[in-house]
Image (cartoon, helix red, strand yellow):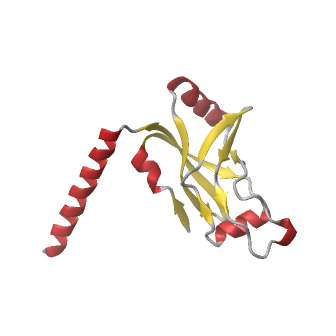
Amino acid sequence: MEILNKRARFDYFIEEEYEAGIVLTGTEIKSVRNGHCNIKDCYGIVKNNEVFLLNMFIGQYKEGNIFNHEETRSRKLLLHKKEIKKIANAIELNGLTLVPLKLYFKDSKLKVLLGVCKGKKTFDKRESIKERDIKREVEKNLKRF
């Protein structure tokens, strides 16, 4: 099961990608396995040499009772120290943004693919739309034959 952030590839140029683990509680992981998760409005920050995801929505687990979690709390990411320093430098010096691209399971552990991104301007977005339309037309014509 994968949860994609399709909007990120449309709104940003992705400079680098990093795979990170994520620290979750028991009810959060159960809720993600059920598909009650959204990373559309989510972004990352570096604070005290640690990386956190803010605004990541994980819905309440139905059978969680009093042990349920807060839905949009900040969640810590697990990265190597060198990777954290690289990300921090890119964010501070170059003015880039840390955006989650997708959430997926790898060997029963939840991973998040982070992108160090640069924002697109409106004309860049129009160009992306044109490329997508041309690609769709080519595929449509190929199916006819």
Q: Residue 134 appears at what percent x and percent y? A: 21, 56
| Residue placed furthest toward the right | 66
Which residue is rendered at x = 58% and y = 61% of the image?
104
Can you say whether 66 is above or below 77 in the image?
A: below
Question: Relative to 62, is 119 on the left or the right?
Answer: left
Question: Could you tell me residue 38's position as x and y percent?
Answer: 59, 60
In the picture as drawn, the residue positioned furthest to the top comes out as 93
Q: Is residue 52 left or right of residue 103?
A: right
Q: Residue at x 85, y 66 (%)?
A: 67
Which one is in front, 57 or 110?
57
The quadrant in which the C terminus is found is bottom left
Q: How many marks?
A: 0
Foreground residue among 93 and 106: 93
Residue sitting at 61 percent across and 70 percent down?
A: 35
The residue at the far left in this view is: 145
Residue 29 placed where, x, y %? 71, 65
Query: Residue at (63%, 68%) from the top-left corner?
Result: 36
Question: Dividing the image into 4 quarters, which one contains the N terminus?
Answer: bottom right
**With respect to residue 33, does 44 lie above or below?**
above
In depth, the one of 136 and 113 nearer the eye is 136
Residue 43 placement: quadrant: top right
The reply, left or right, for residue 118 in relation to residue 44 is: left
